[in-house]
Image (spheres, rainbow, N blue to C red):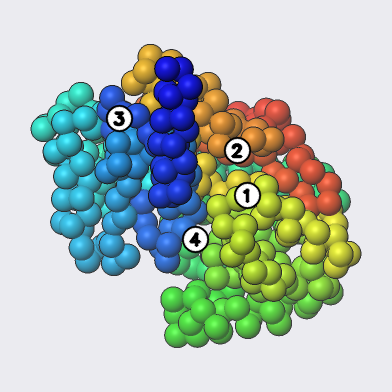
Amino acid sequence: MDKVKFIVAATLFIFLIASGGIVYADAPYHIGIVTGTVSQGEDELRGAEKLIEDYGDASSGGMIAHVTYPDNFMQEMETVISQIVGLADDPLMKAIVVNQSIPGTTEAFRRVKEKRPDILCFAAEAQEDPGVISSVADLVTSVNDVYRGYLIPVAAKMMGATDFVHISFPRHMSYELLSRRRNIMEAVCKDIGVNFHFETAPDPVSDVGVAGAQQFILEKVPAWLDKYGPKTAFFNTNVAHVEPLIRQIVAYGGYYVESSVPSPLRGYPGALGLDLTAEKGNFPAIMKKIEEVIIQKGASGRLGTWAYSCGYAESAGLVELARRVIDGEAKISIEDLVNAYEKYTPGSEWNGSYYVDLSTGIEKTNYILVYQDTYVFGRGYLGLTKLEVPEKYLTIR
């Protein structure tokens, strides 16, 4: 009899594998994750795909319900709101994570809470006012650009830089957080003995376009290295400038700690001519391939990044935290958030702090700012998450 049971079970297992299925027991509840498409937010989407791999698709008995918002989300805000709120129609839905939290997320969460106050609402990289989104979300997370204003110049000096060039343009410098980070960087450079320089580059949304902005960087980096010296570190605020900047630093010298939105997929594949299709979503493999080429090109120790994309980590980590909270394994706290992130970013380290409203001095315990340790190709992690950021820099406007 036991032999018959074994044969039946084995036959069923072979059938399921042959039909391409991983079998998930029906999940007791669902968690929704809303991301952009591949064209608007590939890293965030890859995080959602990893979650489906781990916990199964809700449509097939698993836990994860993944929805992508439209690329032209500003023009289709009502569609975005409807997509998010629609997840609450599922009686098994227990949490909704939105990454990135584009305009409309606050209104969507407000409607979700009216309909289903029991659903946890988590927002990553909120593009709405902190005071507004945090009034309805159970948790908001963003990259800690205030702390990074201190840590990036410190990292540049650790890598060997004597000069630090901040590249931007008027539109970005009109944004409070970006100008604040720039001002912190300048103050830090002065204190640690690094020469700070500001250079203006064309805005890619201006008449010159992306191609013109990138050509400007290609032409200017060698000139800036001649002007400021070979031990100059560069930082830029715009995504379009990253690839030509990395390309010229590899070719001519200088340092690059990390991009404004850190990810190994930001600039490195194009600058180094890498096809990472086979490594899609596998960040250790992506990092290994990039590092091999950088070392081969003689640029070891001069370029860095976060080993795992922030978008990927936020998607996977926030859903993992939601699951742990629902299952009574965690609370909404910095420690438990970091632990959830680290599950999906093995080998890296994270740190975080609560958002403080500069005008009121009030700390928001449901708004957590995070950052990951910087990895320098050919050298390893710098240990930035272990450094304490001096209080005096946190009040610079």
Query: Residue 26, which numbered label?
Result: 3
Number of marks in picture: 4
Looking at the image, is 146 positioned above or below residue 251?
Answer: above
The N terminus is located in which quarter?
top left
Dividing the picture into quadrants, the one containing residue 241 is: bottom right
CA separation in Å, label 4 and label 2:
32 Å
Marks 2 and 1 sit apart, C-alpha to C-alpha, by 9 Å
| CA–CA distance in space, label 4 to label 3 | 50 Å
Residue 163 relative to residue 269: left or right: right
**Residue 200 in which image quadrant:** bottom right
Using the rendered image of the protein, determine whether residue 166 is visible from the camera's viewpoint.
Answer: no
Camera-near label (2 vs 3) is 3
Label 1, secondary structure: give it.
Answer: helix
Mark found first going from the N terminus, 4 or 1 = 4
Which numbered circle lies on residue 173? Answer: 4
Depth check, mark 4 against mark 2: the one in front is 2
Q: Earlier in the sequence, mark 4 or mark 2?
A: 4
Dividing the picture into quarters, in which one does residue 113 lie? top left
User: Callout 1, which amino acid?
Assistant: Phe
